[in-house]
Image: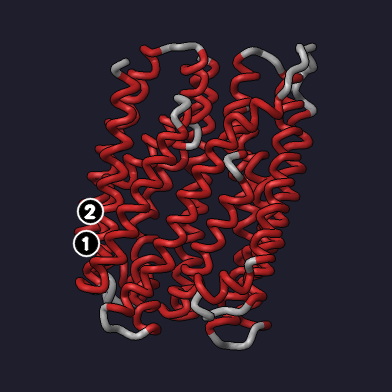
């Protein structure tokens, strides 16, 4: 009963904090979109796709490893093992973060020319290099807080990060940086880098205070490095492939749109409309899903360690049913009120048709978020990554060959192809595990 209360309390705190953060993030994105325009939003989205690949290189599966290893130690009532494991995780994350930064620094020119189409300068990539080690170490600490059922401390850290990012970015855009697409992207990334550094410092302070509260219990020494790497390395290598393919997918979208007959500026603008303006509306209600989805990993890890098949099946069925009902309701609401939502947020209903069309992705996206976290808790994280890799390969092929022929409508179709494939195979994998 105590564990159930802890799960519900964490979910409630994360729900409230996530709603607030999502609202703040939504209006901040609206401010950015209105401030810099759809073309700059498209260019910034390209930079973000590269940034996300760098984050994948830096974190290297350490978040899942941290959550899994610490959850297992707690299940064995081994508090001293928890302290040792998290120290190892933070150290490994620092090393992987530094290596990722070096890779980005060395291949900076290649990234700018081939991935960002010379829309920004090398300075933007250098900024990313600074942020990656801090993001990686924060990831390890976040995994610790999820495992010890104090994920609300991650929420505190995110609040602090968002506050710093909004203040710094607004200052840079309005008072410091000159106008122009490159300077706008530089301001947005610099604001994010500064916020990540402050967020890590705050997270580490919370972690330092928290770990000292764990009572000491003698434990048999074991090689935590091997256990951590056994979980993180397979996830890391497959994540590199998946994230690399995902970045490639984002990079070739404007290229394929250009091949369909539209100019570079219009291609970036269309890309920005969907990725930077319409999709945030679609993803906004997912805050209700994300607030508990991340908590599913440690909970299902405990069921998995104890081989409690009854609870695994019962919890899976309940969570999927609730998620399905919720996503259908949200789909209907966004489809009906798309015009009003777009007018409130962007001052016009020009993109409402895209919001209505993309609203049919909600059921697939939200269910997939939940299923992926359940699978990770059931030691099937590699299956999740392999499904995502296959999804990227199929979607890239579709974008490369179909979008030059179909144009912008081909890009929209590719989003549906991606999500339907992903949910179909993720659900199939989960069913296979449940019926064993």
* Colouring mode (rainbow / by chain / secondary structure / one colour): secondary structure
Q: Is residue 242 above or below residue 62?
A: below
Q: Which residue is mark 1?
A: 357
Residue at the (50%, 32%) spot, across then down: 295
Q: Residues within 10 Å of mark 2 (few under 14, many from 20)?
A: some
Q: Position of residue 201 (x, y in %)?
A: 75, 50
Residue at the extreme bottom of the image, as rendered: 179
Can residue 423 be seen at all in this image of the molecule? yes
Label count reads 2
- Viewed as shown, does residue 98 lie left or right of 314? right
Residue 80: which quarter of the image?
top right
Q: Position of residue 227 (x, y in %)?
A: 64, 25
Q: Is residue 351 above or below residue 295?
A: below
Q: Position of residue 33 (x, y in %)?
A: 45, 74
Secondary structure type for disc 1: helix
Can residue 152 be seen at all in this image of the molecule? no
Calculate the distance from the C-alpha at mark 2 to the C-alpha at mark 1.
6 Å
Q: Position of residue 355 (x, y in %)?
A: 27, 64
Quarter of the picture holding the C terminus: top left
Q: Residues within 10 Å of mark 1 (few under 14, many from 20)?
A: some
Depth check: give the residue in front, 233 or 341. 233
Residues under numbered marks 2 and 1 in contact, where contact means CB atoms less than 8 Å apart: yes
Depth check: give the residue in front, 430 or 101. 101
Numbered circle sitting on residue 360? 2
Residue at the (34%, 65%) spot, across then down: 278
Secondary structure type for disc 2: helix
Residue 232: which quarter of the image?
top right
Q: Is residue 404 above or below residue 181?
A: above
- Viewed as shown, does residue 183 lie left or right of 271? right
Residue at the (44%, 62%) spot, across then down: 248
């Amino acid at each position: 009963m105590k564990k159930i209360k802890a799960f519900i309390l964490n979910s409630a705190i994360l729900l409230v904090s996530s709603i607030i953060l999502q609202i703040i993030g939504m209006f901040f994105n609206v401010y950015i979109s209105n401030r810099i325009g759809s073309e700059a939003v498209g260019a910034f989205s390209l930079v973000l796709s590269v940034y996300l690949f760098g984050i994948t290189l830096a974190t290297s599966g350490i978040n899942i490893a941290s959550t899994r290893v610490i959850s297992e130690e707690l299940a064995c009532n081994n508090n001293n093992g928890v302290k040792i494991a998290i120290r190892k995780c933070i150290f490994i994350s620092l090393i992987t973060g530094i290596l990722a930064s070096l890779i980005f620094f060395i291949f900076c020119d290649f990234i700018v020319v081939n991935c960002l189409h010379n829309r920004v300068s090398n300075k933007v990539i250098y900024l990313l290099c600074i942020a990656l080690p801090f993001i990686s170490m924060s990831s390890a600490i976040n995994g610790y807080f999820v495992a010890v059922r104090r994920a609300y401390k991650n929420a505190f850290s995110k609040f602090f990060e968002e506050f710093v990012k909004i203040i710094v970015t607004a200052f840079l855009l309005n008072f410091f940086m000159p106008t122009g697409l490159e300077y706008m992207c530089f301001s947005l990334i610099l604001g994010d880098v500064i916020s990540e550094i402050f967020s890590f410092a705050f997270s580490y302070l919370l972690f330092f205070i928290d770990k000292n509260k764990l009572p000491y219990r003698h434990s048999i020494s074991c090689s935590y490095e091997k256990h951590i790497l056994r979980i993180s390395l397979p996830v890391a290598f497959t994540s590199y492939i998946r994230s690399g393919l995902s970045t490639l997918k984002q990079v070739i979208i404007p290229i394929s749109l250009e091949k369909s007959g539209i100019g570079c500026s219009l291609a970036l603008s269309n890309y920005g409309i969907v990725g930077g303006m319409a999709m945030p509306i679609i993803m906004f209600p997912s805050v209700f899903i994300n607030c508990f989805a991340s908590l599913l990993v440690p909970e299902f890890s405990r069921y998995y360690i104890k081989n409690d098949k009854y609870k695994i099946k019962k919890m899976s069925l309940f969570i999927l049913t609730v998620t399905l009902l919720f996503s259908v309701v949200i789909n209907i609401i966004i489809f009906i009120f798309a015009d009003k939502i777009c007018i409130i947020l962007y001052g016009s209903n020009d993109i409402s048709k895209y919001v209505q069309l993309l609203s049919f992705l909600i059921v697939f996206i939200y269910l997939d978020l939940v299923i992926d976290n359940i699978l990770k808790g059931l030691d099937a994280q590699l299956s999740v990554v392999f499904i995502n890799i296959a999804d990227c390969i199929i979607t890239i092929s579709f974008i490369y060959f179909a979008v030059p022929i179909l144009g912008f409508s081909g890009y929209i179709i590719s989003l549906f192809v991606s999500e339907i494939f992903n949910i179909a195979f993720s659900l199939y994998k989960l069913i296979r595990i449940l019926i064993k």
